[in-house]
């Protein structure tokens, strides 16, 4: 079978396998981060190494049909059609989390990473299924609202894990949800695996100075 006969999902497809992979990778990474009690800096270095390996594999497969065939056969269910001859989302995912861990304090960085892990695929799912009011080419009002509610809910749960309760947490969480939603919208030009955690981390840092919580 020819390499280009492999069918890959398009961006506007439901593509549940990719969304499950996205969440599964994030949850697995966070699990081992806490279980092994890894320092932020070491985790960031490991993720940068993973990104370098992923980029290297992509560069190799662009010029080696055999490698391309292997990658498409093994990772095809998780890839988009645009990634056949372009970089996959993995290096951007790893780099986005790595930069976030380097730039921000642990609670803020982890919350921003949780936005990436959950809000991104949920916003995409809702946008594909119900996104009738377009904000941009690949962004809809419905998807953005899903991101807002997801980030708000995540922040409330996250705050409770830190022992924070009360009206202050609710206000912080709603504003955090807006930040997460806006960071998802801003990804229409740049890979959202980079924009969501980095921009969310920046917004959450500013918010935490205005409403100290973490």
Image (cartoon, rainbow, N blue to C red):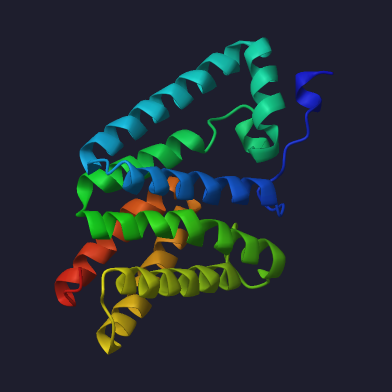
Q: Is residue 204 left or right of residue 65?
A: left
Q: Residue at x 63, y 66 (%)?
A: 126
Q: Position of residue 179 (x, y in %)?
A: 36, 68
Question: For this view, does 67 lie left or right of residue 119?
Answer: right
Residue at the front extreme? Answer: 35
Q: Residue furthest bottom?
A: 167
Of residues 64 and 152, the one nearer the viewer is 152
Residue 167: quarter of image: bottom left
Residue 30, compared with residue 211, is above or below; it is above
Q: Is residue 51 left or right of residue 203?
A: right
Image vertical order of residue 163 relative to residue 25, above or below? below
Residue found at x 76% / y 24%: 4
Specify the quadrant that holds the N terminus.
Answer: top right
User: Which residue occupies 56% across, 56% down?
Assistant: 121
Give x and y (percent) for residue 7. Answer: 78, 34
What is the x, y in percent for residue 139? 56, 62
Q: Can residue 190 be seen at all in this image of the molecule?
A: no
* Residue 37: image location, x then y, percent: 27, 44
- Direction right: furthest residue: 1
**In the image, residue 182 above or below residue 190:** below
Q: Quadrant of the C terminus?
A: bottom left
Q: Quadrant of residue 122?
A: bottom right
Seen at 33% across and 48% down, the residue is 34
Count up the numbered dots.
Answer: 0
Whether residue 42 is visible: yes
């Amino acid at each position: 079978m020819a390499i280009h006969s492999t069918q890959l999902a398009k961006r506007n497809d439901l593509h549940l396998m990719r969304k499950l992979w996205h969440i599964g990778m994030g949850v697995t990474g966070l699990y081992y981060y806490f279980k092994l009690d890894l320092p932020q800096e070491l985790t960031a270095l490991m993720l940068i190494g993973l990104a370098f390996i992923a980029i290297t594999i992509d560069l190799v497969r662009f010029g080696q049909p055999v490698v391309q065939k292997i990658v498409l056969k093994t990772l095809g269910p998780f890839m988009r059609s645009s990634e056949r001859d372009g970089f996959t989302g993995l290096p951007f995912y790893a780099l986005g989390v790595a930069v976030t861990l380097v730039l921000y304090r642990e609670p803020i960085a982890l919350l921003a990473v949780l936005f990436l892990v959950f809000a991104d695929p949920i916003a995409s799912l809702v946008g594909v299924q119900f996104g009738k009011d377009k904000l941009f080419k690949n962004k809809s009002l419905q998807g953005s609202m899903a991101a807002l509610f997801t980030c708000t809910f995540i922040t409330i749960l996250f705050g409770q894990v830190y022992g924070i309760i009360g009206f202050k947490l609710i206000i912080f969480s709603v504003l955090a949800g807006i930040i997460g939603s806006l960071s998802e919208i801003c990804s229409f030009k740049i890979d959202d695996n980079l924009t969501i955690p980095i921009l969310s981390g920046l917004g959450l840092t500013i918010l935490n100075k205005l409403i100290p919580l973490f």
